[in-house]
Image (spheres, rainbow, N blue to C red):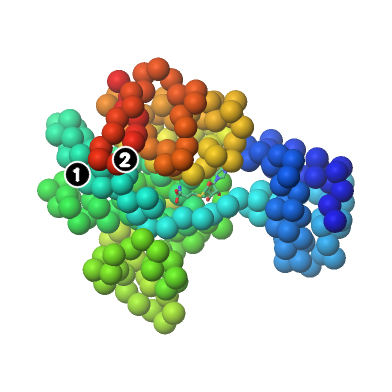
Amino acid sequence: MINPEQFRFFSTLVKESSGIALTKGKEYLLESRLNELARVLGMKDINELYKKAKFNPTPKLKEQIIEAMTTNETYFFRDQHPFEALKSNIIPELIEARKSKKQLKFWSAACSTGQEPYSIAIILEEHFPNIKTWRREIIASDISQQAIDKGKDGRFTQVEVNRGLPIQLLIKYFKQQGAFWMIDPKLKKMIRFKKLNLMGPLIGINNIDVIMCRYVLIYFDQDTKKAILNKLVKVLNPGGYLFLGATETPVGLPTNMKRRTFGRATCWQKT
Ligand SMILES: C[S@@+](CC[C@H](N)C(=O)[O-])C[C@H]1O[C@@H](n2cnc3c(N)ncnc32)[C@H](O)[C@@H]1O
C-alpha cells in the first residue's frame, strides 16, 4: 500500500513535469500504475521504485513515471460532431479565407496514439481533393513518447479500428497485415508527429488554423489550464479555431476567443 509520503512525492513529480494533477483519492490509480511500471522495470514493488526515483533518479525513469500516469484513451472521429463541423463548416470557411496563401495548418495538441490527427487527415483526403496541392500540415504532439511512436507507426488493432471508424473508410484507407491494420502511407505523410509537453514552450508550433486540444486539460488544475489555454491562443491564426473535449469548460480562455456552434459542436474562434 502506498504511504502518504510516497503519494506526495510521486504526485508532485507528475504535477511539476506534466501538469497532471493527482489529487487526494487518486492513490489507488497511482499505486496500480506505478506497481505495473515497477514490475516492467524488474523491480520488486512501488517501494523500490520510490527509493530509486527519490535518491537515484534518471531523466529516463522520470519520463517512464510520467508516461505511466498518462491516460491515452482515444478513438477515431471521437464525439463525431467536431469532425462534422470541420468537414461541413470550418474547413470550407478556412479554404476560402486562406485561398491566396494556400496553406492550412492543424494541430492535435494531445494526440495520444494518433486517431485524432488521422481522422483529420481522412477528412482532408476524402472531402477536399481541391486543396491537394496546398501546403496541408497536421502536427500531432503528445507528452508520451510511446503514444507518439505508436501513432507514427500507423498500426492499429482490430479493436482500435472498430472504434469510431466507418467500415468504408477502414477498407479505403487501411490495409490488413496479420492481426493489424496499417494506415495508408499517404495519410501518414500528412502528419508530423512530435513529442511535446504542453507545460513547456511550444517549440515549432505557430500559425495554426485549427487546434484540437481535447480531453487533456481535464487532468490539470485551473491555473495550469488557464496558462495552457493562453499559450494555445497565441499560436492560433486570427480566424482560427480551438476545440476542447465536449465536457471541458474553457475557464480562463482569453476574451479574443468567441464561442461558435456548428450543429452539435462547440468550439472557439480567434477574432
Ligand atoms: C485522453 S488522451 C486524449 C487524446 C485525444 N486528444 C482524444 O481526444 O481522443 C490525453 C492525452 O494527453 C496527453 N498529455 C497529458 N499531459 C500532457 C502534457 N502535459 N502535454 C502534452 N500531452 C499531455 C496524454 O499522454 C494523453 O495521450
- Residue drawn at x 72%, y 66% is 40
- Residue drawn at x 24%, y 68% is 168
Q: Position of residue 87 (x, y in %)?
A: 22, 46
* CA distance separating discs 2 and 1: 11 Å
Instruction: Give the SS element for disc 2.
Output: strand
Instruction: Give the SS element for disc 1.
Output: helix
**Above or below, 6 relative to 118:** above
The extreme top residue here reads: 255
Q: Nearer the viewer, residue 184 or 88?
A: 88
Q: Nearer the viewer, residue 115 or 82?
A: 82
| Residue underneath mark 2 | 265
> Which mark is first along the chain, 1 or 2?
1
Q: Position of residue 8 (x, y in %)?
A: 80, 40
| Residue underneath mark 1 | 88
Quadrant including the N terminus? bottom right
Report the side of 220 relative to 60 (left or right): left
- Name the mark nearer the viewer: 2 or 1: 2
Question: Where is residue 13, by image quadrant?
Answer: top right
**Above or below, 93 relative to 146:** above
